[in-house]
Amino acid sequence: MTVDDRSAENFRHVRPDPALGTRTDPVVGPVSDWTTDFSHMEPEYAQHAPEIWADLRGRCPIAHTDRFGGGWVPTRYEDVASIAYDTDSFTSRAIIMSNFRPPRDTAPIGGSPPITSDPPFHHDARKLLLPAFTRSAVAKLEPATREFCEELVAGFAGRDVVDAAAEYAQHIPMRVIAEMLGFPAEDGPQFARFVENTLEGVNLPPEERIDRMGELFEYIYDRIREHIAHPREDLTSYLLDVELYGSKLDPSHVAGTIVLLLIAGIDTTWSAIGASLWHLAGHAEDRRRLVAEPELLPTALEEFLRAYAPVTMARLVKEDMSWHGVDMRADDWVLLPFPAANRDPEQFERADEVVLDRKVNRHAAFGLGIHRCVGSHLARMELRVALEVWLRRIPEFSLAAPDAVAWSSGQIRGPRALPVRIG
């Protein structure tokens, strides 16, 4: 259905039918062998992913798992890049590895275009978003972002310990994305719940997962109807007005793209900011150097993105095939751990070290291939401003309780609890 009028009735959400697609029973519990029983959802992976990548890279560069109905995990940069660029063999119709696979006829659009879209549709859907994420467009958001970071830090006055993840890093992208979409800033707690449900709830029974996704889409459709009634200058109204192939976007396209912007725009940057602060809290020499040499921050920022890249994407195998000696079946999952690629010693010297002044740094933190992150300028701005404000206002800080640091499970990896001692 294409929609040429903007009536709210056209934006009534219909929950996904749990009967659609392929489901598998969830498998949880400790991993027996990472080469044959990989699971990115287990606590051990959340806390020790870099060590697991290094082990796999040396023993079994392309690991396998029967969990989630079967999947593969390459850990070398060359393999990750090869799959990311190969849109003929791998589809993006589902990019979150879970126990539910959407039906094949959802391609080439997918549920959250353009990230779930395949060529040729992907190119045109992505092009629609580019104007909102240019350097000049992002620059207009910087003053408000800086002011908000200043407000957050000011709220720590008189305290010895703060949670740099939950009380600082989390809130910055929430505010920025809410402003871009024209959503209420006070809905932040709902955003956090939506992020957790989408990215960390992949082992839930499919019916429950679909119900939780239904709550997210109902929220999105409520905001869309508000924008139809009261148009404004923001990204939601833009998506409602823009045309593709001579027609307004289908309601599901509008809602799916907003879901993408809301979920991906928050969790990735939240994780990057938190991981950077975690590093600086635990490495006093690097922290003091950045405080003394603030002009080094742009280079250091890229190194934080390389070493602590938060994003792993998934693909589905299109047809049975042998890929680099591995027999893959149609609809097998393939995880693309860009963070693992970024630590491949064949690609980067001193790959497991953070080198603040690394001169050559062609990292894959924002992905590779046609799906490279459209919001990279925005993420860099938020990360830079967040670190600039924090380091200027709080030049002395350290981990208050290293054992209390908790990392998220799933395909977005970053600190969720990060208690730091100020001063």
Image (cartoon, rainbow, N blue to C red):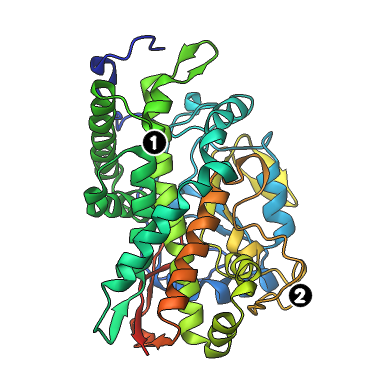
Identify the residue at horizontal 57%, vertical 77% (top origin): 51
* Residue toward you, 52 or 12: 12
Q: Amino acid at mark 2?
A: Glu
Q: Horizontal placement of 339 versus 45: left or right?
A: right
Q: In the figure, 310 relative to 158: above or below?
A: above
Is any part of residue 93 visible from this angle? yes
Amino acid type for the residue under numbered disc 1: Ile
Q: Is residue 82 left or right of residue 122?
A: right
Instruction: Please name the residue shown 39% across and 71% down the image.
Output: 43
Mark 1 vs mark 2, foreground winner is: 1
The location of residue 143, given as percent across then percent down, is 44, 54
For mark 1, give the secondary structure. helix
Q: Which of the labelled discs sits on residue 258, or is there none?
A: 1
Question: Residue 387: where, in percent of width, then height?
Answer: 48, 70
x and y percentages locating residue 347 in the rendered image: 76, 66
| Residue placed most toward the observer, 252 or 71 | 252
Quickly name the residue at label 2.
349
For label 2, the crowd category at 10 Å Cα-Cα, with few meaning under 14, some 14 to 19 and many 20 or more, is some
Instruction: Judge whether 331 appears above or below 405 on screen.
Output: above
User: On the image, which quarter does residue 6 sit in?
Assistant: top left
Q: Earlier in the sequence, mark 1 or mark 2?
A: 1
Q: Is residue 182 above or below residue 204?
A: above
Identify the secondary structure beneath mark 2.
loop
Q: Nearer the viewer, residue 27 or 288?
A: 288
